[in-house]
Image (cartoon, rainbow, N blue to C red):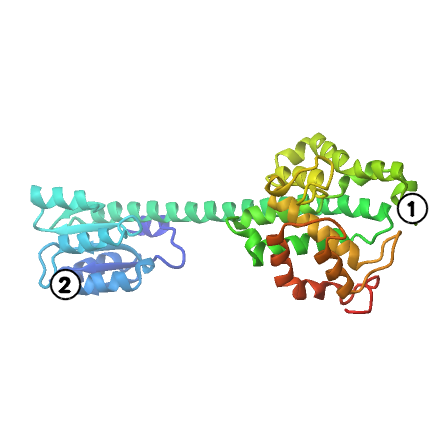
Amino acid sequence: MEQLKEEKVFSGGFDTLLIVDDDEINRGILDNLFSAFFPVEEAADGQEGLEKILERPGKYCAVLLDVVMPRMDGLEVLRRLKEEELLERVPVFLITAEASDSVMKEAYRLGVMDVISKPVVPYVVLRRINSVIELFRARKRLGSKVEQQKTELLEKAHQIIELNQGMIEALSTAIEFRSNESGAHVRRIHDITRMLLTHTAMGEGMSEEQIDDIALASFMHDVGKIAIPDAILNKPGKLTREEYEIMKTHTVQGARLLEKISQLKANSAYVYAYDIALHHHERWDGGGYPDGLKGEAISPWAQVVSLADVYDALSCKRVYKAAFSRDKVLEMIRGGECGVFNPRLLDCFFSVEEELAKMYENVEEAALDGR
């Protein structure tokens, strides 16, 4: 007995043993046998025992169950516990004088851990039940450790995702600095894109993950500008025809750059980033570049980023122009002065523009008039 006391390793919770038997003497014998090792509770019949287990299933480290009892017998208790899927969490032992073949067969079929015949042999019962309880506790500890490790892995994966997104944003911001812009431009493009896809019909049929990828991809819409000479990129006046043709190549250059970043290809945002970089200057009527795509041939995400880019460019100061007032910006977009957009996209845009305009309330370079 003393050796068993030294061997037991119990922790808080999952520590109470429940004895379910209609015979008070039997309950007393088992209580006296196990009370040195566990807190013990008793139930006088199957119904009472079942109610105790269902009320706090995580409390009990084992259930010692008689078979023949009033109100509800032991086999019925087993059936109910099996229905509740509790037999995998709490080991149940039949301790009974009714250990016939049919009872044992049914009990094991239902999922009982062991069938012990009365009268019990104390040291045998203690060893068999203690061993199983320790096995269940070890499995529970292992399960908790696995869950902890899973949580830690998910946290690390999330950190890696955030790091990747930060690197993408940093690259895009660095390119914005080359063109004398603050870097806030790419963040606003991201936010406008997300708003249009989340709160308007333009995002219909898209999953939350897809919208996240498209918004992330929007950061990279102008990465091709890294290949444009400073003299053209930062020219304060109007570009010549030849300079404009060079500027237009930033779409193709951007797609080529993204294609060469092998690590990016493993990111689910890559397919959107490539298409947006290449086609965010296409226009609904076919008047854009570089491929002169028309109508639905332009992907929805490229269309959304295209309009977001125009809206932000008009609303903010650039090296080649001052910021326009909000009223002027909306007039120019409606009138197609910056190219023709999908009428459905325009409807979606104007339905949320009042909310979008709030992004520019504290932007220094934004025009004060109309903000």
- In this view, 349 is above or below 251: below
The spot of residue 119 in percent (x, y) is 11, 51
Image quadrant assignment for residue 350: bottom right
Q: Secondary structure at mark 2?
A: loop
Residue tagged 2: 45
User: Quick one: quadrant of the C terminus?
Assistant: bottom right
- In this view, 41 is above or below 149: below
The spot of residue 178 in percent (x, y) is 86, 45
Image point (79%, 63%), residue name: 363
Please tell me which residue lies in front, 146 or 40.
146
Image quadrant assignment for residue 77: bottom left
Visible in this render: residue 195?
no
Q: Amino acid at mark 2?
A: Asp
Image point (18%, 60%), residue name: 20
Image quadrant assignment for residue 278: top right
Residue tagged 1: 235
Q: Is residue 57 left or right of residue 252?
A: left
